[in-house]
Image (tube, rainbow, N blue to C red):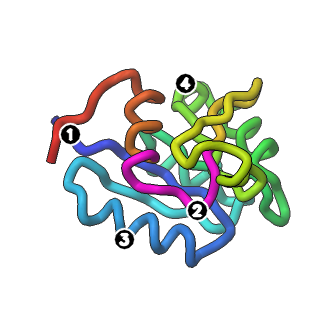
Amino acid sequence: MAPIRLLLIDDEAEFTDLLQLNFSRDERFVTEVENNPLHALSTAQKFRPDVILLDIVMPGADGGDVRVSLQSDSLLRRVPVILVSALVQHQDTDPDAVVETSDGIIIAKPVRMPHLITCIEEALGTKLPVR
């Protein structure tokens, strides 16, 4: 099985660096990072992700703007997007809760890797092999 291609779009470089480090330890994934939301579409077009993890609140273009631009691309519109945001608080939900809105799945920051991997599996509609 080819690795799952994850695109991490978040203006917080520390957050994406930590996620990328965690995913680099798992051969089931390969990641690309974009910290500038204004470059998200071109990065996604070049990288061709299987799943996109997208922050909501970012300067220049918020997650909603980025999502609209991604959906305007015929090859990217079917790529599942998981919104990752500090707008959802763990104290408001169970740490493994998923908030579903009309915009899709939203999970709270800070993320827990096992929960994030479960959300990726759900977005892809498949169970990943155990590593």
On screen, residue 82 versus residue 101, left or right, reads left
Q: In the figure, 36 relative to 118: above or below?
A: below
The residue pinned by badge 1 equals 2
Helix, strand or loop for disc 2: loop
* Pointers 4 and 3 in contact (C-beta within 8 Å): no
Which mark is drawn over residue 110? 2
Q: In the figure, 81 relative to 37: above or below?
A: above
Which mark is drawn over residue 92? none
**Marks 4 and 2, how far apart in space?**
26 Å
**Residue 73 falls within the magenta-colored stretch:** no
Pinpoint residue 102: horizontal percent, then vertical percent. 76, 24
**Marks 4 and 3, how far apart in space?**
27 Å
Which residue type carries mark 2? Pro
Helix, strand or loop for disc 4: loop
**Marks 1 and 4, how far apart in space?**
19 Å
On screen, residue 112 versus residue 92, left or right, reads left
Residue displayed at 53% across by 31% down: 80
Numbered range of the magenta stretch? 107-115
Residue displayed at 56% across by 49% down: 95
Q: Quadrant of the N terminus?
A: top left
**Marks 1 and 2, how far apart in space?**
28 Å
The residue pinned by badge 3 equals 21
Earlier in the chain: of badge 1 and badge 2, it is: 1
Earlier in the chain: of badge 1 and badge 3, it is: 1
Which residue type carries mark 3? Leu
